[in-house]
Structures are given as structure tokens and as C-alpha cells.
Image (tube, rainbow, N blue to C red):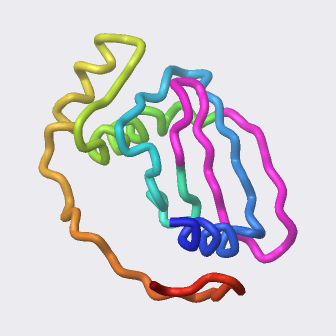
Amino acid sequence: MVDAIRHDALEFSNCRIHVLTSGAGEFIIGDQPFLGDMVQANIHFVVLSPFFVVGIQKIAEGAFFSYSEFPKEFLREFNEHVARHARKWIVSNERSALESYIPFADAPKQDNTPIFESRKHFFPGFRFI
């Protein structure tokens, strides 16, 4: 586990972090908060709360972050994706919002078969047992 975290840290050592707030409504939260690259722009999203989402994008230049408001025209679609991605539960501050996303949460899920990725970085002092 330590090796996997160190490996991922090296992969994202230069990144742009987008902190997005929700001014037009609230984000729902599911039991799978890491959403991956859902917009095919090499931005991986994580829902932190009903009011904040973080997008992480790997870049060639030095790391930095930006802070902006999430576009309200994409809020519903984003929440639908969160609901489809959830496995066991979704949470919302508003009951009506929660009820509108339940059909997406109940939809069939993608395959959960683990994916093996070989090591790219080797660290001194680590060994296989």
C-alpha cells in the first residue's frame, strides 16, 4: 500500500489542482468519491463535500491550483455520474435531490475486477517478500 501511494505521488508530482465550489446547487456524495477522468481531459475528480469538488490534472510545468465555481449547467450531469459511480450509498442534504438521483445509483455497475498495474518506480529499501 505504501509503495502504491508513493508511486501515485510520483505520477502526480506536477499537477494542477482545481478547487470547484457549487454556487448553483449541491453536489451529492457517494461511497466511491474518486471519480476518475470523467470528461476525457485528463482531470480526475474527487467530491469532498456538498459544496466542494477537487479536480487533479497532470501537467508538464510546475504545480499550482485554481479556485472557481462549478458551471451550473453541468451540476446535474455531474451528480448523475456520482450516483452511477456509487456502489452502496449516496448522500444529499436535500431529500428531493436524493430521490431524483436514486435511479442512477440503482443502474447496473461496471465490472469490479481488479486491475494489475506493474511498478514503474523502484524505491531503495523496499523489497518483495
In the image, residue 64 lies at what x, y percent?
84, 56
Residue at screen point 58% across, 60% down: 43
In the image, residue 127 lies at what x, y percent?
56, 86
Res. 120 image quadrant: bottom right
Q: Would residue 112 be found to the left or right of residue 8 on screen?
A: left
Q: Would residue 90 be found to the left or right of residue 50 on screen?
A: left
Residue at screen point 71% across, 86% down: 124
Which of these two is toward me, 35 or 21?
A: 35
Res. 10 image quadrant: bottom right
- Residue farthest front in this picture: 129
Residue at screen point 73% across, 37% down: 68
Looking at the image, residue 45 lies above or below residue 68: below
In the image, residue 31 lies at what x, y percent?
35, 38
In the image, residue 2 lies at what x, y percent?
57, 66
Looking at the image, residue 119 lies above or below residue 62: below
Which of these two is toward me, 39 or 52?
A: 52
Which of these two is toward me, 97 or 92?
A: 92
Q: Would residue 86 be found to the left or right of residue 45 on screen?
A: left
Quadrant into which the C terminus falls = bottom left
Q: Main secondary structure of the magenta part?
A: strand
Residue at screen point 44% across, 57% down: 38
Q: Which residues are magenta?
A: 46-69
- The reply to whether the magenta stretch includes residue 21 is no
Res. 58 image quadrant: bottom right
